[in-house]
Image (spheres, grey):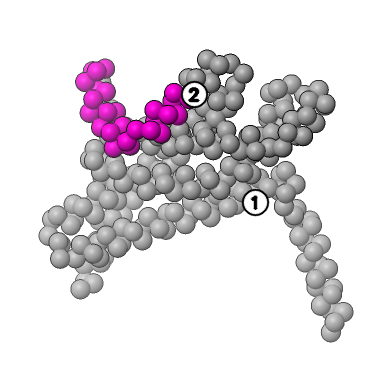
Amino acid sequence: MFDNVPLFVETILDGLLLTVEATLGGILIATVLSFVFGLAMLSGSRTVRVIARIYVEVWRGTSEVVQLIWIYFVLPILVGYQIVPLMAGILVLGLNFGAYGAEIVRGAIQSVPRAQYEGAIALSLTPAQRMRRVILPQALVEMVPPFNNLFIQLLKGSALLTIITVHEMTYQAREVLVDRFISQAWLIWLLVLLFYLVLAVLITTLMRFVERRAARLVGRGPSRAARARALQVTADAGAGVH
């Protein structure tokens, strides 16, 4: 029953690189758009806020599948230029999840206590300096956990690229399944699930590191020196007991 596992794994691995490329490309675009439009929604300009809100509501409120079809099939008809499937997929992932990320950024910035704004103003910092030096570093700590969830959702959303014939992992699994292994469909899709799980765990591990790093930078976690002192105190106490 498991004789074909090496073949299945090899076939799925053929699509792993494209899945990783689509995920990383989507994460990069989504992160940039999240900060651009998240900050834009807090702008003092009503026009900027309206433009940012339109972007968020359109991309967050419409189907990701329809967005993909529009970018890959409809847009080339309108502009006369065919987009490479992988690039179309990355663009849709970035635009779609960037809309969700913009709300994360906006919410995290607004969660910073008002006293922090007032303290920055008292120090005569410009609005840009207040945001860069005081507000954003604190808001970043609050952003990391929801961004972790967002990036995992983006990873899973990359499976939709099979619709436009991007040979990522889901596409590869479907091809080998349709070929001649229908009776072992459960095994093929189990392997695909495991591959996605491993990638999700890697994203979570990286984001937890980023979260700890960001927390230390704003003084919310023990520094390396403080942890070393705590360990030394514990060791000394243990030695005293013996």
Does 61 appear in magenta? yes
Q: Earlier in the sequence, mark 1 or mark 2?
A: 2
Name which residue lies at 63% across and 34% down.
Answer: 109
Q: Nearer the viewer, residue 24 or 162?
A: 162
The one nearer the camera, 232 or 48, is 48
Q: Compared with residue 156, is residue 66 higher up or lower down, i.e. above or below?
A: above
Please state, as top left, top right, bottom left or bottom right, where the C terminus lies in the image.
Answer: bottom right
Q: Is residue 168 above or below residue 10?
A: above
Please tell me whether mark 1 or mark 2 is closer to you in this view: 2
Looking at the picture, does residue 121 appear above or below residue 11? above
**Residue at x-position 44% and y-position 25%:** 55
* Residue lying at the far bottom of the rendered structure: 242
Q: Amino acid at mark 1?
A: Arg
Per the image, the residue denoted by label 2 is: 52
Residue situated in front as seen by the camera: 160 or 112: 112
Give the label on residue 212, or none: 1
Q: Position of residue 97 (x, y in %)?
A: 43, 37
Question: Could you tell me how far apart the alpha carbons at marks 1 and 2 are, in whole angstroms?
Answer: 30 Å
Q: Looking at the image, do the residues carrying marks 1 and 2 touch, with CB atoms under 8 Å apart?
A: no
Q: Look at label 2 and name its amino acid.
A: Ala
The percent position of residue 85, horizontal first and vertical second, equals 27, 34
Q: Bounds of the magenta span? A: 53-80
Q: Decide if residue 198 is on the left or right side of residue 230.
A: left
